[in-house]
Image: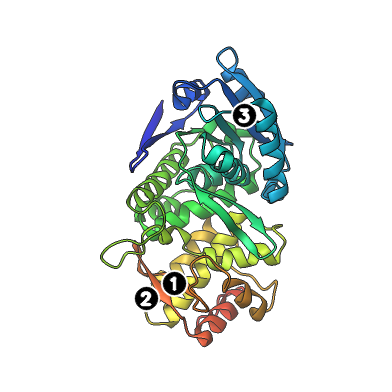
């Protein structure tokens, strides 16, 4: 059994979700492809993908560093050299096989080689399936912050083989739920209901509930990016694609401060709780919805508190966020579940109080 989720827009593509669906990869690549570069982390064998492509293509494996260490200009340049030596043309393709960092880096390489070649993403983590692989955002990191260099480059397809999650460490699976729960708060309350009524121990790769959560989160992202691919804004007060960055302003600041040693989904959970606290103090969000942030993320095993750096350090890092305009900090917040908006120029006193609240294990909301 598999589901096919269509991502509409100028260059529509399919996201295939199911168990044991690697044989669908050639169809996603399409016609006319001769060479395929499989970009994968050093610690993950690309054999399953190479086997799925054998016989039909000239396959080149490109091993890159694990995790965020891959997302540098140096690694990207190394990939370009491999493509050049292999004689890659505009009709050839890149396949990424790995987590979100691999998707971001490989997508960026595909976007910039000959100004854009085909790319198909085969995410192997829950986080990458529901976040990085869908939507066409690619990027690398710099000393100034995360994903500040990049481009929009939509894939020709995404293959989410849930069988790859069976060997994923539990902590990585839980981290991926950070983006799933986020999607519940910004667009699909059924996700929150499922999380709140399911024993977290039953959220395993072979469970029907996890499959539904994955599909629902992907549909949320598909609908948002189809309406606002390049983050130019939504309509009727909706922030458009920026809504997907809910919780990410503080999350990226924490990741940078921690030198990316914290998992992205963990940082997103903390960031969502933080902006809920900010919105509550700004009079935008009801106290019960603020409290629901604490309980929903905590229920699946994600952190909801953080005190690893002074407020001033994180505040400075947040100002470099991509949503900022000049010196004006802009936060995606909620006015209710499923109702995201942008809070421009939040009161610094509210920011400090919200950070103090998440530094407390009890989440002091006084």
Q: Give the residue displayed 44% in from the left and 24% down from the top.
A: 30
Q: Quadrant of residue 252?
A: bottom right
Circle 3: element type: strand
Percent of width and height locating residue 355: 58, 78
Sequence-first disc among 3 and 1: 3
Location of mark 3 (residue): 37
Name the foreground residue: 214 vs 102: 102
Given this view, does label 3 or label 1 mark the residue nearer the observer?
3
In this rendering, the answer to whether 360 lies above or below 77 is: below
Q: Give the residue displayed 66% in from the left and 35% down from the top.
A: 40
Mark 3, other Cα within 10 Å: few <14 / some 14–19 / many ≥20: many
For residue 51, side relative to residue 197 (left or right): right
Percent of width and height locating residue 191: 40, 51
Most extreme residue toward the bottom, as rendered?
A: 349
For residue 150, side relative to residue 85 (left or right): left
Most extreme residue toward the left, as rendered?
A: 236
Label 2 near label 1: C-beta < 8 Å? Answer: yes
Q: What's the CA distance linking mark 1 and mark 2?
A: 6 Å
Given this view, does label 2 or label 3 mark the residue nearer the observer?
3
Quadrant where the N terminus is found in the figure: top left
Which numbered tag is attached to residue 286?
Answer: 2
Q: What's the CA distance linking mark 3 and mark 1?
A: 45 Å
Percent of width and height locating residue 58: 62, 18
Name the foreground residue: 277 vs 102: 102
Q: Give the residue displayed 52% in from the left and 47% down from the top.
A: 132
Location of mark 1 (residue): 290
């Amino acid at each position: 059994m598999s589901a096919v989720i269509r991502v509409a827009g100028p260059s529509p593509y399919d996201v295939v979700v199911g168990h044991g669906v690697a044989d669908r990869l050639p169809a996603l690549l399409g016609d006319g492809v001769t060479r395929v570069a499989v970009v994968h982390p050093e610690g993950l064998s690309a054999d399953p993908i190479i086997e799925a492509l054998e016989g039909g293509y000239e396959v080149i494996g490109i091993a890159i560093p694990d995790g965020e260490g891959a997302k540098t200009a140096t690694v990207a340049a190394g990939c370009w050299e491999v493509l050049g030596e292999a004689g890659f043309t505009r009709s050839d393709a890149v396949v990424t096989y790995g987590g979100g960092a691999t998707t971001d880096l490989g997508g960026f390489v595909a976007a910039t080689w000959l100004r854009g070649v085909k790319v198909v993403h085969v995410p192997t983590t829950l986080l990458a399936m529901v976040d990085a692989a869908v939507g066409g955002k690619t990027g690398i990191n710099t000393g100034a912050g995360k994903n500040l260099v990049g481009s929009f480059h939509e894939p020709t397809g995404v293959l989410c083989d849930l069988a790859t999650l069976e060997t994923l460490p539990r902590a990585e699976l839980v981290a991926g739920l950070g983006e799933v729960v986020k999607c519940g708060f910004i667009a699909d309350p059924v996700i929150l209901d499922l999380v709140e009524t399911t024993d977290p121990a039953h959220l395993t790769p072979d469970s029907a509930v996890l499959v539904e959560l994955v599909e629902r989160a992907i549909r949320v992202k598909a609908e948002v990016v189809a309406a606002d691919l390049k983050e130019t804004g939504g309509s009727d007060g909706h922030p458009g694609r920026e809504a997907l960055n809910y919780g990410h302003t503080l999350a990226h600041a924490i990741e940078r401060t921690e030198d990316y040693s914290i998992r992205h989904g963990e940082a997103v959970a903390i960031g969502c709780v933080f902006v809920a606290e900010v919105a509550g103090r700004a009079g935008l969000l009801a106290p019960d919805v603020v409290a629901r942030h604490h309980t929903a993320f905590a229920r699946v095993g994600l952190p909801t508190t953080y005190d690893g750096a002074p407020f001033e350090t994180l505040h400075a890092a947040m100002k470099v966020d991509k949503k900022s305009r000049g010196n004006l900090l802009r936060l995606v917040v909620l006015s209710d579940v499923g109702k995201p908006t942008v809070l421009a120029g939040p009161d610094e006193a509210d920011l400090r109080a919200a950070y103090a609240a998440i530094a407390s294990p009890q989440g002091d909301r006084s």
